[in-house]
Amino acid sequence: MPSVEENHNRWANYDWTDKGDEWSVGFGGTEAMWAWFLQPRVSPFLPSAHTLEIAPGFGRATQFLVPSSEKLTLVDLTQECIDACKERFAKYDHIDYHVNDGKSLDMIEDGSIDFVFSWDSLVHAEHDVLESYLAQLGRKLRPGGTGVFHHSNIDSYRDQRTGELTVGNEHWRAPTMSAEKFRKYAEAGGLRVVVQELVPWGGTDFSDCLSVFRKDVKRPLFKRNTKVVRNARFFAQIQERLAGEVREVTELYRTS
């Protein structure tokens, strides 16, 4: 299991020569990753008065949040990543930087966040980390605030009789996390999961999930079910650059 300590050791000692851009190759590069995959999914929530990014690494996605956030707060487990982001974005004066313990958001003022985002990092975080973050975000998000998290769904492939995983895990996804658990933790924190997009990552198993959640301005009169989408054409959509599909995804991610 990739514990908080294991995550810290892995990324504190990782060779960051390429600043994380090596993970964008399958998208055609980091700019293409943002333009054809992330931007259509987060555009309904940007620009933002105050954006929080959890686990930014060396700023691969952060660079696109900088111009669309009046204030941007970065929180990462490793000092190396925060130092790299400070250097990379040194010319901007609207960014705050924090090193945390992998679970805490105590440095964030309650009710101050409009949009919270985490991409390609919390897929390695176990259920206790996501549970902790979602519980705190129930307080940190302002009413009407939203979030998009990329996290593991590997735990959904577990044999209920033996407790063993029924799929491989070559991409080091957190084996105790699933889309169902995310919904449970979000609800416990007073948040509503609007959309979950299940995607394969270099295979056919839906190992990853992108969850869109919201802190409603007022409690809904009736429980609204989460829209769960199994996107088997995940990488095909990126590679084909179909404008129609990009518009379709953008509409899917709009909150009511």
Image (cartoon, rainbow, N blue to C red):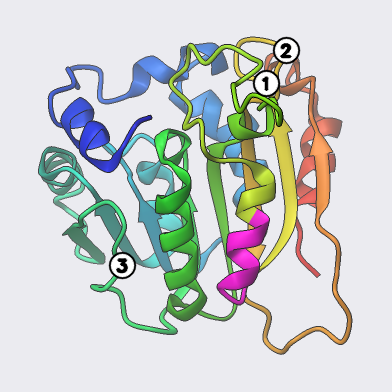
The magenta segment: 183-191
Which numbered dot is residue 204? 2
How crowded is the residue under tag 1: few (<14 C-alpha within 10 Å), some, or many (20+)? some
Magenta span: helix, strand or loop, mainly? helix
Mark 3 → mark 2, Cα distance in angstroms: 35 Å
Q: Quadrant of the N terminus?
A: top left
Task: Inspect the image, locate mark 1, and give the three-letter code of the amino acid beneath it.
Answer: Pro
Residue at point 34%, 31% (across, down): 2
Residue on which the image places disc 3: 105
Which numbered dot is residue 200? 1
Q: Are marks 1 and 2 in contact (CB under 8 Å)?
A: yes
Quarter of the image holding residue 39? top right
Q: Earlier in the sequence, mark 3 or mark 1?
A: 3
Give the SS element for disc 1. loop
Which numbered dot is residue 65? none
Regarding residue 249, the answer to whether it shows in the image is: yes
Farthest residue toward the front?
Answer: 161
Residue at point 35%, 21% (across, down): 21
